[in-house]
């Protein structure tokens, strides 16, 4: 009898607990959505275009032409680096990003100057045009690959 009473009491407690426990709001739970396939990444290894090399350029800085060379390098792991040399000095390029035939890069002007940002678009394997921006000033830049 005691055993039967204990089972009846525990059964009653379980039923009461189930009856008083709030049901989860199924409508508020977001339904899983299928994930979109990630866009393919452009890497130097998979791209036919390789900007590495030495480039002669002319930049227009508020009507004043600046000429020089840009040397772009590619490490064994595909990482790009480089520098720009002109009468102003040398700018070591950092944060180089390639997307198709577009390249963006940044560097710091000589003597601890401000950051300069470049955006290049390569029309073909031997010519580019683009722009640069430094402290709110922008200018045009274009160049050709230096032939050996």
Image (cartoon, rainbow, N blue to C red):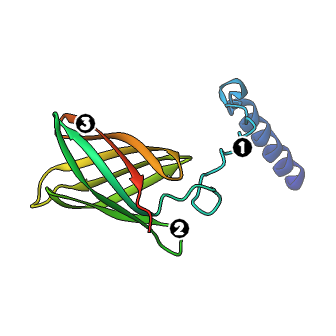
Per the image, the residue denoted by label 3 is: 139
From the viewer's perspective, is residue 125 above or below residue 45?
A: above
Q: Secondary structure at mark 1?
A: loop
Compare marks 3 and 1 and give the one earlier in the sequence.
1
**Contact between labelled residues 2 and 3, with CB atoms less than 8 Å apart:** no
User: Which label lies toward us, 3 or 2?
Assistant: 3
Query: Does residue 52 appear to the left or right of 137 in the view shown?
Result: right
From the viewer's perspective, is residue 143 above or below residue 90?
A: above
From the viewer's perspective, is residue 7 above or below residue 83?
A: above
Per the image, the residue denoted by label 2 is: 78
- Label 2: few (<14), some or many (≥20) within 10 Å? few
Compare marks 3 and 2 and give the one earlier in the sequence.
2
Query: Does residue 69 appear to the left or right of 74 in the view shown?
Result: left
Query: Does residue 32 appear to the left or right of 108 in the view shown?
Result: right
Compare marks 2 and 1 and give the one earlier in the sequence.
1
**Contact between labelled residues 1 and 2, with CB atoms less than 8 Å apart:** no
Q: Secondary structure at mark 2?
A: loop
- Label 3: few (<14), some or many (≥20) within 10 Å? some
Residue name at image x 75 percent, y 36 percent: 18
Residue name at image x 77 percent, y 42 percent: 14
Q: Give how far across and how far down residue 78 sits, in percent.
A: 53, 67
Residue name at image x 73 percent, y 35 percent: 33
Q: Which mark is residue 37?
A: 1
- Label 1: few (<14), some or many (≥20) within 10 Å? few
Residue name at image x 53 percent, y 72 percent: 77
Q: Give how far across and how far down residue 136 sits, in percent.
A: 18, 34
Q: Looking at the image, which is closer to me, 46 or 33?
A: 46
How far apart in space, not on screen, are marks 3 and 2 (Cα)?
29 Å
Q: Looking at the image, which is closer to me, 35 or 105?
A: 105
**Contact between labelled residues 1 and 3, with CB atoms less than 8 Å apart:** no
Q: Looking at the rendering, in which quadrant would you find the C terminus? A: bottom left
């Amino acid at each position: 009898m005691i055993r039967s009473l204990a089972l009846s009491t525990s059964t009653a407690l379980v039923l009461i607990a189930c009856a008083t426990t709030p049901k989860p709001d199924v409508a508020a739970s977001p339904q899983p959505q299928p994930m979109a396939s990630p866009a393919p990444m452009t890497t130097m290894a998979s791209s036919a275009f390789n900007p590495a090399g030495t480039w002669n350029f002319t930049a227009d800085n508020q009507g004043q032409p600046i000429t020089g060379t840009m040397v772009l390098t590619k490490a064994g792991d595909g990482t790009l680096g480089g520098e720009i040399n002109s009468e102003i000095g040398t700018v070591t390029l950092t944060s180089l990003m390639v997307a198709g035939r577009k390249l963006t890069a940044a560097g710091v002007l000589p003597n601890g100057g401000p950051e300069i940002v470049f955006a290049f678009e390569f029309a073909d394997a031997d010519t580019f045009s683009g722009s640069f921006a430094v402290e709110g000033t922008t200018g045009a830049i274009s160049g050709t690959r230096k032939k050996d």
